[in-house]
């Protein structure tokens, strides 16, 4: 079934046998045209005639049968129990609670194929009149004593086996508390305090658009949202224009944990979302994604990650690659600031680690900005291709400032490409860039970076500006190194004897300050062609490269 927005499937066994890749949902469009076309899409007909069901907790009089604003349901539960696939539920501004009797187990349950819209004043006659920010609709878990989270709802909204025509749009989720004990780790009640999306052994492809999630807490996974694609599950919800703030998880995913990949390709899994001041007791301060052996590519597009914190790995994003066939991931146009991973290395902003070897991964960061990472590298990636497998790590048109930039472990046939990127005013504990594979740097600027750490001997810094191990080769072209404070091992340092050579071509080095050596030290060979060195202490071992 196709629309102007996407092709969708509605039967759970479409993917039987050897699955082929499907595409679900092209780029959403901006309001107001988005609102008009969005409603047109969401009114796709199913087997029963679609209808609009109205809910307004403040309405007085009327039949309370949901047929109009005047006759709106008072209870959202009533509308959800009545809705059929293809129906839309319009919910007026106000606060709606899963339980009126304090029962923490009660929750709103969204049926498959139903579109749930908030943000109405209660007088609209067409969807384009809705202003969800001016008329906030709150789904609150604060069902007990006010300001006492210990008696709040375990889960505010629950959905299970829902296809891509299912949507939640225009709601504020707050004060869910999934701290239920005596249940399995990751079970409803213990994870996903705002929304629990269950696609275990089945599927789940809902759209979560134009929503805010604040002050939600989970005992285990996904402080705000948990996506369960365990077993044979295929899951890929799409989050668009959502804000996640002040959410906490006891273990993984302060805002969101998604467990499982998808047989269907969903474009822009996270698009124009903001994650701010979320926390995880272990890893994934904002987002934790555990990939499984499926076909999809994960994409973060135009998202902001600000002041998120993880105790261990991935203050912003923690990504565990789980595909033997290789991970495909893109981070495009995203902004990272003051995120923190409290251990030494693992990704204050982004952490990646695969659970399988002999794989071919492709990870790309394009047009992203990384500022003021308080602890951990801005990007930490272990990409482990062995034998005939390959990997590709791309950083293009990015900016790193006042952070601890990049550590990439990529062995054998792995390749790292850095282009059109600025490393400015960073103060790294070990190195600005660490690679374990071939690395190509082009059209980039390294300026005013400082490296400082004591290694073994007292008062003798052990500093590596660019470090390559036994499999690595570094090629630097059309780049500038200006006023960097280096250490005894210079700019290029090779840990072990390397089969490859390093190259500096059409580049400029000026005013760099080293303690002992210049551009290279230890076992590195560096060939230079058509490059300029000004006010530098360059090593005598630099070799000319004939043109």
Image: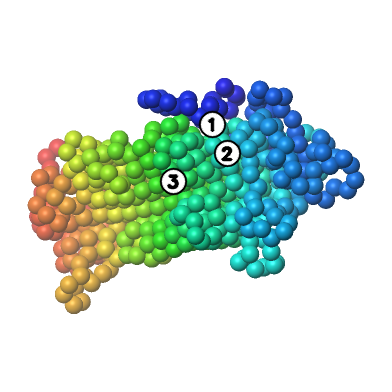
Seen at 50% across and 40% down, the residue is 199
Question: Is 163 positioned to the left or the right of 290 in the image?
Answer: right
Above or below, 375 relative to 407: below
SS at mark 3?
Answer: strand
Name the outermost residue toward the front.
182
Q: According to the image, label 3 marks what residue?
A: 259
Q: State the separation of the CA atoms marked 3 and 2.
A: 17 Å
The first of marks 2 and 1 along the sequence is: 1
Q: State the separation of the CA atoms marked 2 and 1.
A: 10 Å
Asked whether the beta carbons under mark 2 and mark 1 sit within 8 Å of each other, the answer is yes
* Residue 524 visible here: yes
Above or below, 432 relative to 362: below
Seen at 26% across and 63% down, the residue is 430
Q: According to the image, label 1 marks what residue?
A: 25
**Quadrant containing the N terminus in the rendered view:** top right
The first of marks 3 and 2 along the sequence is: 2
Above or below, 452 relative to 361: below
SS at mark 2?
Answer: strand
Q: According to the image, label 2 marks what residue?
A: 207
């Amino acid at each position: 079934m196709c629309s102007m927005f996407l092709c969708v499937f509605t039967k759970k066994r479409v993917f039987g046998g050897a699955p082929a890749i499907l595409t679900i949902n092209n780029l959403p469009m901006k309001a107001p045209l988005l609102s008009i076309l969005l409603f047109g899409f969401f009114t796709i007909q199913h087997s029963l005639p679609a209808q609009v069901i109205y809910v307004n907790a403040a309405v007085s009089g009327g039949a309370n049968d949901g047929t109009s604003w005047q006759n709106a349901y008072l209870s959202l539960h009533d509308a959800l129990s009545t809705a059929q696939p293809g129906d839309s539920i319009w919910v007026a501004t106000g606060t709606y609670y899963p339980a009126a009797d304090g029962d923490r187990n009660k929750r709103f349950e969204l049926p498959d194929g139903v579109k749930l819209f908030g943000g109405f004043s209660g007088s609209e006659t067409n969807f384009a009149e809705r202003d969800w920010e001016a008329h906030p609709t709150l789904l609150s878990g604060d069902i007990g004593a006010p300001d006492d989270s210990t008696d709040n709802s375990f889960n505010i909204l629950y959905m299970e086996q829902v296809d891509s025509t299912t949507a939640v749009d225009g709601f504020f989720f707050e004060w869910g508390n999934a701290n239920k004990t005596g249940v399995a780790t990751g079970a409803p009640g213990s994870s996903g305090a705002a929304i629990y999306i269950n696609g275990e052994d089945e599927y789940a492809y809902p759209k979560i658009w134009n929503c805010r999630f604040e002050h939600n807490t989970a005992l285990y996974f996904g402080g705000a949202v948990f996506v369960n694609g365990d077993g044979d599950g295929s899951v890929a919800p799409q989050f668009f224009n959502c804000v996640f703030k002040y959410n906490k998880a006891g273990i993984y995913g302060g805002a969101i944990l998604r467990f499982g990949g998808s047989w269907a390709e969903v474009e822009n899994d996270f698009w124009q979302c903001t994650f701010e001041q979320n926390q995880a007791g272990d890893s994934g301060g904002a987002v934790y994604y555990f990939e499984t052996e499926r076909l999809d590519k994960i994409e973060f597009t135009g998202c902001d990650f600000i002041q998120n914190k993880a105790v261990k790995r991935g203050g912003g994003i923690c990504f565990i690659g789980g595909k033997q066939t290789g991970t495909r991931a893109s981070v495009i146009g995203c902004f990272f600031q003051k995120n923190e991973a409290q251990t030494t290395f693992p990704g204050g902003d982004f952490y990646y680690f695969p659970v399988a070897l002999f794989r071919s991964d492709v990870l790309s960061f394009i047009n992203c900005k990384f500022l003021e990472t308080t602890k951990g590298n801005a990007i930490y990636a272990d990409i482990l291709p062995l034998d005939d497998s390959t990997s590709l790590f791309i950083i293009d048109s990015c900016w790193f400032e006042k952070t601890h930039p990049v550590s990439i472990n990529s062995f054998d046939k792995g390749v790292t490409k850095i282009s059109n990127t600025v490393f400015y005013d960073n103060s790294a504990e070990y190195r600005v860039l660490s690679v374990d594979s071939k690395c190509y740097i082009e059209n980039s600027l390294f300026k005013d970076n400082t490296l400082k750490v004591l290694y073994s001997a007292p008062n003798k810094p052990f500093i590596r500006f660019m470090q390559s191990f036994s499999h690595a080769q570094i090629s630097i072209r059309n780049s500038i190194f200006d006023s960097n404070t280096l250490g005894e091992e210079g700019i290029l340092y090779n840990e072990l004897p390397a089969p490859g050579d390093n190259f500096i071509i059409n580049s400029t080095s000026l005013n760099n300050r080293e303690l002992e050596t210049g551009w290279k030290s230890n076992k590195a060979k560096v060939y230079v062609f058509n490059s300029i060195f000004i006010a530098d202490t360059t090593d005598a071992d630099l070799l000319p490269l004939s043109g």
